[in-house]
Image (spheres, grey):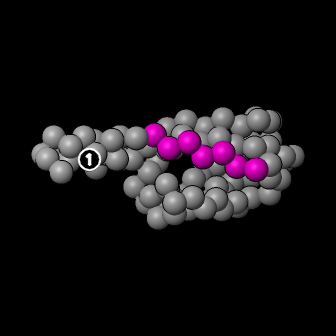
């Protein structure tokens, strides 16, 4: 692989956004596993199918291959998260 190809792969890996969609849930915490998730991902956008289900702040903690959503919920919702790697 040449230097330009290596650089492009690095940039794509570093700045690619990952979309994660959950099944419907009505209790927290929830853990989602997906090999695309890494520990240095953070949430850049979140979309709930039922926003009223979120009754307080939610925290998303990422690790290699999974993420955990915690907080308070009333009712049920699906959640679509958009993750991006931090630039630190």
Q: Secondary structure at mark 1?
A: helix
From the viewer's side, name the closer residue of 88 and 58. Answer: 88
Which of the 4 quarters of the picture holds residue 87?
A: top left
Horizontal relation, residue 51 to residue 64: left or right? right
Q: Which residue: 24% across, 40% down?
A: 8
Q: Is residue 54 left or right of residue 66?
A: right
Q: Residues within 10 Å of mark 1 (few under 14, many from 20)?
A: few
Front in this rendered view, residue 28 or 17: 17
Spot occupied by residue 34 in the image (x, y as percentages of width and height): 57, 58
Residue 58 screen position, x and y as percent: 64, 49
Q: Is residue 18 magenta?
A: yes
Q: Residue at x 65, y 62 (%)?
A: 31
Up-down relation of residue 56 to residue 51 (above or below): below
The residue carrying mark 1 is 10
Outermost residue on the right side: it is 75
- Tell me if residue 84 is in the magenta stretch: no
Q: Residue 45 at x, y = what percent?
A: 55, 36
Q: Is residue 33 visible?
A: yes
User: Which range of residues does the magenta coloring cover?
Assistant: 17-23
- Residue 12: image location, x then y, percent: 33, 41
Q: Check the image and report above or below for 48 versus 61.
A: above
Please identify the quarter of the rendering in which residue 4 is found: top left
| 39 versus 14 height, above or below | below
Return the residue found at the far front: 1
**Number of callouts:** 1
At horizontal 80% and vertical 57% (from top left) the residue drawn is 27
The single residue placed furthest to the left in the displayed view is 3
In the picture provided, is 71 more to the left or to the right than 82?
right
Residue 57, can we see it? no
């Amino acid at each position: 692989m040449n230097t330009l190809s290596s650089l492009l792969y690095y940039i794509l890996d570093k700045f690619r956004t990952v979309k994660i969609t959950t099944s419907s849930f009505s209790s927290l915490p929830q853990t989602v596993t997906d090999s695309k998730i890494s520990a240095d991902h953070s949430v850049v956008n979140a979309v709930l199918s039922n926003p009223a289900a979120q009754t307080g702040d939610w925290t998303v903690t990422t690790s290699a291959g999974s993420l955990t959503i915690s907080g308070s919920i009333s009712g049920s919702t699906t959640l679509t998260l958009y993750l991006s790697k931090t630039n630190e």
